[in-house]
Image (tube, rainbow, N blue to C red):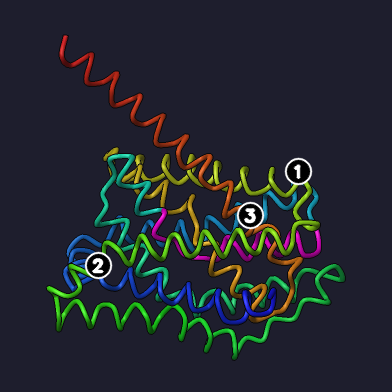
Amino acid sequence: MSQLLSQIILPAVLAFIMLAMGLGLSPRHFSAVLRAPAMPLLGLVLQLLLLPALALVVIAILGLDGPTAAGLFLLSLCPGGATSNLFAYLANGQVALSIALTAISSLLVPFTLPLLFGLYLAQSGSDATALQLPIGPTINQLLIVTFVPVLVGMAIRHWASAWADRLEPWSKRLGTGLMLIVVLGLIVTNWPLLQDPIKALAVLMLSCTAMLLSGWIAFRASRDAAIARTLAVEVGIQNAGTALLVAISLMHQPALAVVPLIYGVLMNVPGFGFVAWVRYRDGRASAVSAT
């Protein structure tokens, strides 16, 4: 059952989620980025450079090593997901910017993740020598599971927009529900590996610091609260399914998947905490302006 879950069901569910994302995308999402590229480019820099750097800081502070450290760094290389788009909406951010960043990072990750994670493993010393990333097969698998489904979804949106409009809402809900089931199944099958509070602390530290720091940088750069909230969520909420795919389906290392599994559950804590904080701030601002 564990092999069926990791080798067949997980890749299929992740591909379905990427297809659902593609159903909601059209060239206008990317043309908007090209017309005003500064903030999307900043978001990608924060996603692709700042987040892995923060992961290395958390690894150093907590003294993590082996699969725990590698799992946290792997997670930091993943793109945002549909959950980040939801939190951007709830936090009164710019949803179109969030969707565009999620899409672009998802299209880049088949190339960036294998290279950066392979470099990390090569530089990690003896604790990571047992972890070998097959870079060629990883790129191919990520292309098949993430890149191609997004393009297929966009093609359906372009050639059959009415059908895409009907499919998109329920496909996103179904994909989210299926991924939740997969995560729960992986938690059950790997429960003995999950009982470590240090791992929970690591994922919370990474998510919270990523949100706070990226939001602060984005606000300093744009002076726009909606953009700052969007980048905070996009950098702080990752697609743990991609990390699970690499760890379990490609590398066959359940221990490497422990941190992404914990993250898949705990990422909602800083996410909803951030939403509650910004809504409280907005409520206070509205009350002050009304007096």
Given the image, on which type of amino acid does mark 3 rest?
Ala
Q: CA distance from mark 3 to mark 1?
A: 17 Å
Crowdedness near tag 3: few (<14), some (14–19) or many (≥20) residues, C-alpha within 10 Å: many
Residue positioned 15% across, 14% down in the render: 290
Q: Earlier in the sequence, mark 1 or mark 2?
A: 2
Instruction: State the residue lying farthest toward the right.
Output: 126
Q: Quadrant of residue 2?
A: bottom right
Please state if 59 lies on the left or on the right of 5 as rendered.
right
Kindly report the secondary structure that dominates the magenta region of the rendered protein: helix
In the picture, the quarter occupied by the N terminus is: bottom right
Q: CA distance from mark 1 to mark 2?
A: 38 Å
Please state if 244 lies on the left or on the right of 33 as rendered.
right
Tell me residue 253's x, y (percent): 74, 73
Which numbered disc, 3 or 1, marks the residue closer to the eye? 1
Q: Quadrant of residue 229?
A: top left
Q: Earlier in the sequence, mark 3 or mark 1?
A: 3
Query: Which residue lies under the disc numbered 1?
Result: 197
94 drawn magenta: no
Crowdedness near tag 1: few (<14), some (14–19) or many (≥20) residues, C-alpha within 10 Å: few
SS for callout 1? helix
Which numbered disc, 2 or 3, marks the residue closer to the eye? 2
SS for callout 3? helix
In the picture, the quarter occupied by the C terminus is: top left
Instruction: State the residue lying farthest toward the front.
Output: 1
Residue positioned 19% across, 76% down in the render: 157
Circle on res. 24: 2
Tell me residue 44's x, y (percent): 41, 62
Instruction: Examine the rendered structure and indicate whether residue 98 appears above or below residue 130.
Output: above
Q: State which region is magenta.
A: 65-83
Query: Which residue lies under the disc numbered 3?
Result: 55
